[in-house]
Amino acid sequence: MTLTEKILARAAGKASVQAGDNVWVQADVLMTHDVCGPGTIGVFKREFGDKAKVWDRNRIVIIPDHYIFTADSKSNRNVDILRDFVREQGITYFYDVIDDPNGHWVFDAAKGALKRQHGSHYAGVCHAALAQKGHTRPGEVLFGTDSHTCMAGAFNEFATGIGNTDAGFVMGTGKLLIKVPETMHFQLEGKLQPGVMAKDIILHCIGEVGFDGATYRALQFDGAGATSLSMDDRMTIANMAIEAGGKNGIFEFDAQTQAFVDYRCKLNGTKATYDPAARDKNEKFVYEHVLDLSKLEPTVACHPDPGQRKLARELGHIKLDRAYIGSCTGGKTSDFLEFARILRGKRVAIDTFGVPATPEIVHDLQTARWDNQTVWEILVAAGVQMTENAGCAACLGGPVDTFGRMNAPLKCISATNRNFPGRMGHKESQVFLASPATVAASALAGKITDPREYLPA
Ligand code: SF4
């Protein structure tokens, strides 16, 4: 069995499963957020009754993160619906925007978008927060009402996005009927060269198969090249399995995985035991691709979908209006450090927005010092508009007052993960997906640029 099949077999209480089997699996964690949480709660109450209790109040994790820093009253109200439900059900893990469990969330637009407006429990973008708060464990099954839930496959777990109806059912029963996906095998060899990042790996792989080339399939990443990648890198790659249509992305368990997970579970007092899935000799794959990371070049997914692969050096003719770094995929500490390494001591030529994925990442950037400046100060000095209000922001467009949203038909290079028409706002805007390094170099030049032109000595 492949890694995905092994985890699903275990969660179904079976000795083995194979691709195409339909099995009832036991969930370990169900995550929902402010966009889908109210709908999921509505389904749960409709199907199980107004007085029903959730299947396990310790296994449902609620993370508001999407439409948070907006004066849109309906969006603010969604966070209040989550808070009311958490109180009613006694749910343990709720990363509220405000500290008052009986309060109401209202964004104060008069304070501006840059200064922190959230309370001390707020955790930022759900997928990054799940990992940082100790909710991602090897060998487990994680369902989330968000397509990028697959990011947790970096931790050797089966993690996938589900709709509100399925999530309402999981909320009531802890179970879900799953068709076991076929597995595609991406064997990574060699090491990334300077200026080339994990984002380039996944953009390459999606370009190889197309934006629907992995529909309802598992993407398994392994090999010596995968082992050489940091946990942040693996998260970037697993996150975008869905951009090829994948059901999930998954990595092997190793010492790095263990160190990350053990540290995070201990830090947050979450469940610290788990059972990783190891590879079998008799894995059956429907597709094989061997990728030598040392040969990879900075890669861009052009408008209008994540499969439109080109090399950054081929796209110097594309002039840009905007650059954006942020999201679960591209807003991690390591992403901002690479971004800052290229921008340091220089000045961006176009509007450039920076949105860290979580408050912890804001803190990292505001405390990491390079000589006599923090990384945050370096970015601000380079002209980047950095917000302390970590969250999804313009990755998903959002209400018109969302920080960084494209309200006009602009061309933007972005470290986010999805670029279908209208994704970041205006339906005629164009988004070019790239690594934080390529976004930085392009922000300096005002056109799509290979970051190797700007690498510091
Ligand atoms: S940052 Fe973007 S991709 Fe990630 S969860 Fe938020 S909207 Fe989705």
Image: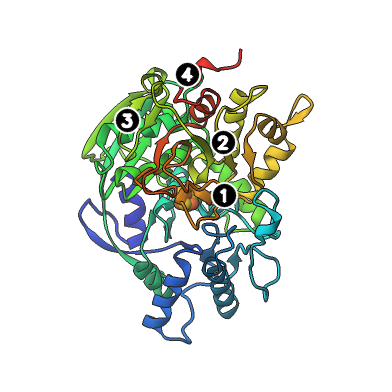
Q: Residues within 10 Å of mark 2 (few under 14, many from 20)?
A: many
Q: Which residue is mark 1?
A: 403
The reply, left or right, for residue 401 in relation to residue 408 is right
The residues tagged by marks 2 and 3 sit, at their Cα atoms, a distance apart of 23 Å
Residue drawn at x 30%, y 26% is: 290
Q: Is residue 307 above or below residue 36?
A: above
For this orientation, the residue located farthest to the right is 372
Q: Which residue is mark 2?
A: 352
User: Of marks 4 and 2, which one's residue comes earlier in the chain?
Assistant: 4
Of residue 382 and residue 166, the one placed in the foreground of this image is 382
Q: Are marks 2 and 3 in contact (CB under 8 Å)?
A: no
Residue drawn at x 61%, y 25% is: 343
Task: Tell me the quarter of the picture where residue 171 sits.
Answer: bottom left
Report helix, strand or loop for mark 2.
Answer: strand
Discs 1/3, front: 1
Residue drawn at x 55%, y 24% is: 444
Q: Are marks 2 and 1 in contact (CB under 8 Å)?
A: no
- Residue 85 x, y percent position in the rendering: 54, 76
Quarter of the image where the C terminus is located: top right
- Residue 376 x, y percent position in the rendering: 69, 36
Q: Which residue is mark 4?
A: 193
For this orientation, the residue located farthest to the top is 457
The residues tagged by marks 1 and 4 sit, at their Cα atoms, a distance apart of 33 Å
Q: Which residue is mark 3?
A: 309
Report helix, strand or loop for mark 4.
Answer: loop
- Residue 115 x, y percent position in the rendering: 70, 50
- Residue 127 x, y percent position in the rendering: 50, 51
The reply, left or right, for residue 382 in relation to residue 422 is right
Report helix, strand or loop for mark 1.
Answer: loop
